[in-house]
Image: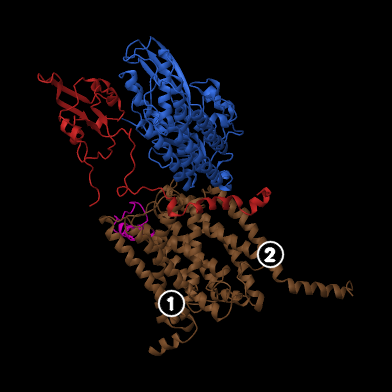
Amino acid sequence: MLDAITNYLYSSATPGEAGSMFWATIYILLITIGVSLAVICMNWLERKILAHMQVRLGPMRVGPHGLLQPFADALKLLIKEDIIPQDSDKLVFWSAPVVVTMTAFTTFLVVPFGREHAVTDMNIGILFMLGVSSLGVLGIIMAGWSSNSHYPLMGSLRSSAQMVSYEVAMGLAIVCAVLMTSLQTGTGTLSMIGIVESQAQQHTWFIFKFFPLGFLAFAIFAIAMVAETNRAPFDLPEAESELVAGFHTEYSGFRWSLFFLAEYAAMLAVSSIAVTLWLGGWLRPFPNWLSGAAWDTAFSLVPALTMFVLAGLCLLGVVRMPKIPQMKAQTLGLLIFGLLLGFVGLVLLVPGVRERVQDIFWFVAKVAFFMYLYIWYRGTFPRYRFDQLMKVGWKILLPTGLGVLIATALWGLLPQLSSAVFGLLGVGGVLP
Amino acid sequence: MSLSPLVRKIFLVDLIKGLKVTFNYQPPSEAITEQYPLERPVIFERYRGQPRLKVDPDSGASMCIVCNLCALACPEQLIVVKGERNPVTKRKEPVSWVYDLSRCMFCGLCAEACSTDALELTQDYEMALYSREGMVLDQAALERGQEPVRYVK
Amino acid sequence: MSERTDYLDLDTKDETFLDATELVLNMGPQHPSTHGVLRVILKLDGEKVLGTECVIGYLHRGVEKIAENRTYAMFNPYVDRMDYVAAVSNGLGYCEAVEKLQNVEAPPRAQYIRVILTELCRIASHQVWLGTHALDIGALTPLFYCFRDREEILKIFEKYCGARLTTHAFRIGGCIYETYDGFEQDCLKFCDAFLPKLDEYEELLTTNRIWVRRTRGVGILKPEDCIALGVTGPVLRASGVKWDLRKAQPYECYNKFDFEIPTGLNGDTYDRYLVRIEEMRQAVRIIRQAVDGLPQGPIMAKIPKVLKPPVGEIYHSIEAPKGELGYFIVSDGSTQPYRVRVRPPSFVNLQALDKMVRGLLVADVVAVIGTLDIVLGEVDR
């Protein structure tokens, strides 16, 4: 046992590769807790950022600046009465949220937080993620069907139709990126870690590769992933002001919170795909332009710096709290939170920790950027009508994706193509 | 920036413009929320809120002379005043005053009609009560005005 | 009381569809998008709407009956409660109608004050419309921006007459409140701050491709249909008919101001949106002119304390933010009117709903109800 642990710790393989079930389990637990924590953060961030975009403050009362609001919401959902419609299909009703949540969490098996920080590095990593997230659609249909009510059924069918349509566009964009992995070495790879490695090898993030093709593929994926997760501006199936209230109408309390958890986990998962495929995964910015030990050290200080900035914001909030006795508890809470963040920042300054945390930090930072984009879109754009939504998916994204794919293939083959063309021309006697 | 419509369409210029607008409103200084009950709103002078019967500050006697104009002016007829003439001061003094706040629509016609400026609608707006009976105000309640309920311990 | 079902009888209504697969869907009184307690019964064929039936009356309070038991001055606060979003213009219509009956005219200063407040109220009403309409279509943020601007207008109302929503600002014969110190500055400050904000709303919505796709070609109402149904207000003007009571039958001192009447081309939701945005700009123009030209003088005409208008009847209408708001008052010589009939613009505009949504999808019904700008307080009274 001890040998296995030491063997794994000194290897540079993921637990899955190293065959270490113990560490794989530890990683799975860490990821589950991490994703749940991320969803809690997302809840608070979404409410606060959306509120600020709408010139209001958002939750302010529950904890200092509403920091405990997600916990209050979770507690409220847990203690709610569990209502099951009378004529519903009980087994399917119970298992639908489970299916959706499990598929959302299972996709995180192959997400690489760092070079050796994935649960496992399947050689069909990206295919696995795409396939498992498609299973989530099944869960949605199950939810709508088992509710035994007209509107959830319509809502779930619409939702699933939307998700399936945009998966096609997503798939095409992913194929573009996978194609780009084969350029340097001649053999492409579907493995998530392999894709990031090939970006490192080719010295460019795929978003900038073959400009503008890489960017176009990224843009197609970015739009498709918003539609895939039923978020604004493609959130008609779950909009409140529409007649069909969505597939989770009949779910209340904990079951609904599972759907909510699954939606955010799916958002995180597709953002992870986008980050891995186009934004260089765990690679720090400018590894080649700004290379060298000094730059490495400078960039490795950024996680600690981020923590210090957050701690500074908390302390600023403490200073600006109204100085009345009712706010004493909140001020104290915010101060403790700020000090905690500062302490974490200090820990991140330690050289040993610094190196290890680097990759994870950059990955999480990029995924956080995508989460911000999600919230930004929700605050800005109106909703597409369902037929317009489908039109965008099939008539705009799909042809563009095909075009980008063909163009990428041609561009990638350009060296061989041009030499072949020249050879033919030479053989044909056109060229001397 | 005069780009051709096609360029605008491809580069999603209209969507990006919208994103810019919402982005610029993010700093907390733009938020207009008034965190009631920690921050009370500014109520202006002419606000028609809680009614009050004024009392002469020197003598302590009510300024109302029971002319009954307010009761006649009220659209809902929720004021009932009864008074009797004080033989010493030769003024009518109110004996019973009833103002039914639950039916009041705060139109201000009673305060306009008052001949001695005794009845006025103040700037108090926190009139919530737990029972309906408390909404029928008598003279003492009208003269006292409203004590705001403390919502925060 | 049994449920009325005769209006669900389809065969007598429309002979063209005999399909048994159609669905009757109830957009019930409580719904986030019906702008109040409006019940819309939709007959659908899949997603396409075949016909609608509106059931109203959930907010009926008997305002017109109340009027028969109140004196003319006492009824004034009640009219604010009809179109509660734009209370000031309700009061204006009523006061003007009674003044016409009594054959008095408000003094010029009162007229200017009335115009300023009414145009502010027009902006406030259109702000509510814009916010809720955008919310129905899915844009969450314009609601808050609009209510932020409306807040400034309501502050001016509060400073002037003491209430934000149910203003009771005017009296029969003029105004009772003199302008407060700083009224003109407040109005001009608001106008200066408001126009850039309006540009921001336009940036968010007018060219936004999602907004255009949701609103262009949706709910088209042809000019002939508008006139046949009696639709007035921005809905009529967006269909291309240049009819605004402020220019056609000027009341108050509107003939002294220089402003334009925006009209649309197609009569769809997008045109109605553009017309109302432009109306807000023109309202700012009127306010600026009125504040600059505010004359001195009395603010109340000579009205007897106990008002007994001569026997007769009168119909007077004004251009409320939502359309033509009319008051038909019959006086029998006593202190209380014999009959007050209100012609609410939302009630008449709502009749156009059926014509506008035929053939549209269910998601568009919500957009069309929003674009008609109805307030149920007015529809039901």
Span highlighted in magenta in the image: A65-92
Q: Earlier in the sequence, mark 2 or mark 1?
A: 1
Pointer 1: residues within 10 angstroms few (<14), some, or many (20+)? some
Pointer 2: residues within 10 angstroms few (<14), some, or many (20+)? few
Task: Give x and y (percent) for residue A50.
Answer: 44, 54
Which is nearer the eye, C99 or C215? C99
Rendered shade, chain A: brown
Rendered shade, chain C: blue
Q: Mark 2 falls within which chain?
A: A
Q: Mark 1 falls within which chain?
A: A
> Is residue A79 inside the magenta stretch?
yes
Q: In the figure, the red chain has which letter? A: B
Question: Height in image: A357 above or below C162?
Answer: below
> Is residue C314 inside the magenta stretch?
no
The Cα–Cα distance between marks 2 and 1, rounded to whole angstroms, is 47 Å
Helix, strand or loop at mark 1 = loop
Task: Give x and y (percent) for residue A430.
Answer: 89, 71
Regarding residue A217, the answer to whether it shows in the image is: yes
Same chain, labels 2 and 1: yes
- Tell me which residue sits at (55%, 51%) in the image: A389
**Where does label 1 land, which residue?**
A349
Which is nearer the eye, C305 or A165? C305
Quadrant, the C terminus of chain C: top left
Which is nearer the eye, C147 or A233? C147
**Where does label 2 land, which residue?**
A406
Instruction: Point out which mark residue A46 bears.
Output: none
Look at label 1 and name its amino acid: Leu
Look at label 2 and name its amino acid: Ile
Q: Quadrant of residue C58?
A: top left
> Which color scheme did the rendering employ for the protein?
by chain
Q: Quadrant of residue A346?
A: bottom left
Quadrant, the N terminus of chain C: top left
